[in-house]
Amino acid sequence: MRDGKKPIIRVLPVILFGMAMIFLILRYDRGTGQEAFSGASEGSSLQQDYPMSRDSFLLDTFCSITLYEGGGSEALFSAQELLSYYDGLFSPTGPDSDIERINNRQGERIAIHRDTAELFESISSVYESAGGDLEVTIEPLTSLWDIKERTEPPMEEEIRAALQKIGYLRWDIEEDEDGDFYFVSEDPELRVDVGAFAKGFIADKLRDRLISEGARSGIINLGGNVLCFGKDTDGGSFEVGIRRPEPGASDYILKLKADDVSVVTAGIYERYFEYEGRMYHHIIDPKTGYPSESGLLSVTVVGESSAICDALATTLLIKGTDEGLSYLRQYNEEFEGSYEAYFIDEEMKVTDSKDAGDP
């Protein structure tokens, strides 16, 4: 096998939707500009304690799990425990982190949990087909740029040195005869960063846990990585709003129906710093070592697997609209996928992959 900002929660008052009065419950994360909605009409047949939710700050972002039918508090508690477990396992640091152990390993092999092996496997189809635009070993660059703390870009020689440490397909995951898993690389300087796809993998696992414990309808929001399953309280589709990709914007540029799918956005407009009139954002192109200059402000991917949506969103943003459209078409054909993407460029033009045709 080969492979965020502070939360804002708003409860809006009763509004007019068509001819029906509904309550609109909205959760919003500035890190991605996505919002998930569900309408609950008066006289709903749900139990009195629905919807129910648990909120937390994990995975370095605001996380919310909301149930609209089935499972109850026991399912929510179980999902929250699982979320906390993954937060520790995939953290860049910490005593329970496999990522920290991989990045500070001694020797070619380091034992890892089965869940970590599954994390890498979950996006292997994107990783191996993206031509280096999705790079698991990008950590030397992401830590060098350190967008949260930097006020000016790194020196060019520092970027060149970091690029030398990135190892496209210079690592592997192995399973021995006892069913134990190992991360293997002959490069002692090779380090991994799973930030481009870990939330998607976790969202998929949380959905599976909730459904196994009786949940029939809910929304999982991990810092704007939104996964909806089941129907909303009126039996219709959930709706996810995509905020205009500009700092501080509050209006929507898209509203998407979400029937048992994930909606994941990669955008350049929240985590960045400015230096000498230029913006440097957090999505680093692993080929150049600099923030992506594809001409895109954001890409939103909709599809069944949240892990794949997560990985595709970053990949497509780096590729740009034309190359991204071609790649997504090839990906869907090769892997029998049905993923759709919405590209938003610097002119605020929205390109829907289903309507774009050949670039």
Image (cartoon, rainbow, N blue to C red):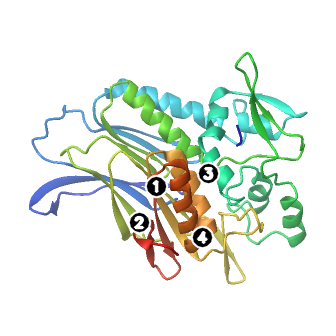
Could one spot residue 166 in this view of the protein?
yes
Q: Label 3: which residue?
A: 126
Q: Nearer the viewer, residue 333 or 2?
A: 333
In which quadrant is the N terminus drawn?
Answer: top right
Residue at 74% over, 69% down: 290
Q: Which residue is mark 4?
A: 323
In percent of the image, x 66 and y 75: which residue is there?
293
Q: Residue at x 72, y 83 (%)?
A: 276
Instruction: Relative to 234, say whether 347 is above or below.
Output: below
Of the image marks 1 and 3, the number of the one nearer the N terminus: 3
- Whether residues under marks 2 and 1 lie with C-beta atoms below 8 angstroms apart, the answer is no
User: Gap in Å between the C-alphas at discs 4 and 3?
Assistant: 15 Å
Q: Amino acid at mark 2?
A: Lys
Q: Secondary structure at mark 1?
A: loop
- Give the mark, 2 or 1, whose residue is nearer the N terminus: 1
Disc 1 marks a residue whose amino acid type is Tyr
Does dot 3 land on a helix, a strand or a loop?
A: helix
Using the image, tell me which numbered label, if any, was put on residue 354: 2
Q: Position of residue 24 (x, y in %)?
A: 24, 54
Residue under numbered circle 1: 339
Q: Residue furthest front?
A: 333
* SS at badge 4: helix
Characterize the local packing of mark 3: few (<14), some (14-19) or many (20 or more) Cα atoms within 10 angstroms: many
**Under tag 2, what secondary structure?**
helix
Give the left or right position of residue 305, taking residue 143 as reference: left
- Rate crowding at label 2 as few (under 14), some (14 to 19) or many (20 or more) other CA atoms within 10 Å: few
